[in-house]
Structure formats: structure tokens, C-alpha cells
Image (cartoon, grey):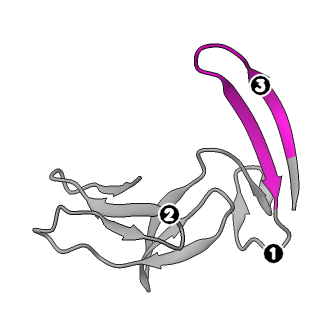
Amino acid sequence: MENETDFAFEGLMPLVWNRSYYSDQDGTGWLGEGWSVPGSQRIIRDAAGLAYIDDQGRLFPLPEPEEDDEEPVLFESEQIWFGKNSDGHYVIA
């Protein structure tokens, strides 16, 4: 794994922009094959169902939330909460 800091701004709300390279990462990130950047996390739907792609480019499957279930589910291995809000949008926290 290789990490690079492209820029950093100090202040009340500091901002650090890092990019990381993972040679075993599947797919192409915003900066090309193997690279991940902040904000590239996303939820996708494919033939297998829902999946979450984290900030390291790792993909893991998510269950489809029930229509009336607004309570998020904790994935302890990844330390994230996943659910669907009252507007029908998926939420990762």
C-alpha cells in the first residue's frame, strides 16, 4: 500500500486530501487502476444485489433493507451502519 498526501489545509475545519494505492484493488478509481481517494465510497447495485465500496476500494455485499425498516444495521467488521431513510435513500454512517 502506498499513501500520498496531495494537499492539506489547516484551520477550524482542516482538510487533508490523501490518495492510496492498492495493487489488489478491483476496478478503476477516480485516479486510475488501484487508486482510492476520499469521497470515493459508494453503494452500488448489480446483478448480485447491493454492495458497498469503501475508501480503500474494497467491495462487500449489503442486504436489501425491508421497506418498512428504518433502523440501520451495524456491520461490526467494518464499523459502519447501513440502512434506508424515510425518503428511501440508502445511508452509510
Judge whether residue 15 is colored magenta: yes
**Helix, strand or loop for disc 1:** loop
Which numbered disc, 2 or 3, marks the residue closer to the eye? 2
Point 65% across, 44% down: residue: 38
**Mark 1 nearby-residue class (10 Å; few <14, some 14–19, many ≥20):** few
Front residue of this view, candidates 32 and 66: 66
Q: Which kind of residue does numbered mark 3 sit on? A: Ala
**Helix, strand or loop for disc 2:** loop
For mark 1, what is the residue? 24
Judge whether residue 69 is colored magenta: no
Across and down, in percent, residue 41 comes to: 56, 55
Residue span colored magenta: 4-21
For mark 3, what is the residue? 8
Which quarter of the rendered picture does the N terminus lie within?
bottom right
Q: Which numbered disc flags the more N-terminal residue, 2 or 3?
A: 3
> Which mark, by number, is residue 58?
none
**Mark 2 nearby-residue class (10 Å; few <14, some 14–19, many ≥20):** few
For mark 2, what is the residue? 79
Q: Which numbered disc flags the more N-terminal residue, 3 or 1?
A: 3
Front residue of this view, candidates 41 and 33: 41
Q: What is the CA distance from the residue labelled 3 to the residue labelled 1?
A: 27 Å
Across and down, in percent, residue 67 comes to: 14, 70
Q: Which kind of residue does numbered mark 1 sit on? A: Asp
Front residue of this view, candidates 28 and 1: 1
Q: Which kind of residue does numbered mark 2 sit on? A: Gln
